[in-house]
Every structure is written in structure tokens, then in C-alpha cells.
Image (tube, rainbow, N blue to C red):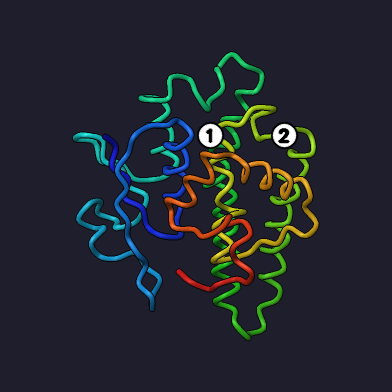
Amino acid sequence: MLIVHHLNVSQSERVIWLLEELKLPYQLRLYQRDQTTQFAPAELRSIHPLGSAPVIEDGDVVMAESGAIVEYVLARYGNGRLTVPVASPQYPHYLYWFHYANASLMNQIAINWIATMAAGTSNNSGLLSVLHERLERHLQMVENHLLQATYFAGEEFTAADIMMHFPFGTMKAFYNVGLDNRPNIKRWLATLSTRPGYQQAMKAAGHDQDPALEWDTTRRAL
């Protein structure tokens, strides 16, 4: 049975959600962030050298990185579910958005978040303006894509949607990108929130309600 090491309010939610959607059995081991630093507890380092989540154990296999874990689970246990066949016209969309979520979008959000905290009250508006404009380009690209498709890989829900959810859902606990002028992203989030697998996963992950709605203000945590 797969063992999922889950840190509260983290990208390990993706792994739990994937396993719920695939209806695969798993054992969940929960870790809480330090109340002062908001870092993961030191005990996670005994599972993986970096001491961050998610981490899964599958027999002798120990794997970190949410994207790698999702690909691993799909390849070994997915039986073609939640993916797109390579020959499908939608495959490039699936592949792009699956990797874009962490490689580009989360990276840009993190840079904005850290720069905003570092700037504080200092006069560094020029840099922040450039970073905010870059993030806006990302958000507008996502918004435009969802104007043309129900999900990121087309008209079917896939693992690309699981990967893309975190930046607009739980990430709000740290940095809220703001979606007031993004009706297509908000529609997509609302659609995902009705999935039983999503609801079960968020409950297992420790949320009292949908994390896309849970955070009213930006919590500046690590």
C-alpha cells in the first residue's frame, strides 16, 4: 500500500486527491507545520533528505516532488486514467499544463510572494511592478485558455487539473493572486470543487472547507 507523508497546507494535497480520484488504497501520515516558522517538522528529514512534502513510499521506492509522484502513480497504477493518450490532439495541452503548474506558474507566484515580503515598507516599487506585470501575464494566459476549454486538457478532467489547482487553491494561504477579474478560472475552480474525489481529499488533507474559498486574507508564512 502507498504511504503518503502529508504536510498540512502543502502540495501533498495533490497526491491525496489523485489517489482519491483513482480510488487507490493509501496510508496517510500527517505532519504539522511549526506554529512559529511555518516550516515542516524536522522528522520529515528522516523520510527524505530535504525534509519537505509530499513524499510517498511504495515498497522500497521513496519519492518526493508532487509532479514526479503524480506521474509515477499514473504510470504504475493509473491504467490510462486521468491522462491523455499520446496520439490525442489534446496531449500537448495535457503535457504543457501539467508541467507549467510548478515549473512556471508556482515559480512566478513564489517570486512575487517573496519579493513582496522582502520589500516591506521600502521603496522598491519598480521591481514589484515588473514582477506583478509578469504574474498578470501568466494569469491572463490561464484565463484565456479556460475561456476555450472546460479543463486544461480539453473537455475531460485530468491530472493536469490536479496540478494546476494548488496555485489558485491552497496557495492562497501564503499569497493570494486575486481572481476578481478571472471568471473562467473561478468557474473552473467551482467545477473542481463538486468532484467527490476532491471533496474527500481536502477533508483528508485537513481542510474544513474548500481551500479555494477558505483563506480570506493573505497569510505571510513559509
Measured as percent of width and height from the top left, residue 109 is found at 59, 59
Residue drawn at the location 32% of the way across and 45% of the way down: 4
Measured as percent of width and height from the top left, residue 168 is found at 62, 54
Measured as percent of width and height from the top left, residue 218 is found at 60, 71
Residue type indicated by callout 2: Thr
- Report whether 138 appears left or right of 56: right
**Which secondary structure lies at badge 1?**
helix
Residue 150 - label:
2
Residue drawn at the location 53% of the way across and 25% of the way down: 83
Which part of the image, by quadrant, shows the C terminus?
Answer: bottom left
- Report whether 222 appears left or right of 1: right
Residue in the foreground of this view, choosing between 219 and 115: 219
Mark 1 in CB contact with mark 2 (< 8 angstroms): no
Residue in the foreground of this view, choosing between 116 and 146: 146
**Which secondary structure lies at badge 2?**
loop
Residue type indicated by callout 1: Ala
* Relative vertical location of residue 61 with respect to residue 35 in this rendering, above or below: above
Label 2 Cα neighbours within 10 Å, binned few <14 / some 14-19 / many ≥20: some
Q: Quadrant of residue 160?
A: top right
Residue drawn at the location 59% of the way across and 30% of the way down: 94
Residue, far bottom? 121
Residue 159 - label:
1
Residue 37 - label:
none
* Relative vertical location of residue 80 with respect to residue 212 in this rendering, above or below: above
- Report whether 221 appears left or right of 161: left
Which part of the image, by quadrant, shows the N terminus?
Answer: top left
* Relative vertical location of residue 90 with respect to residue 7 in this rendering, above or below: above
Residue drawn at the location 53% of the way across and 34% of the way down: 159
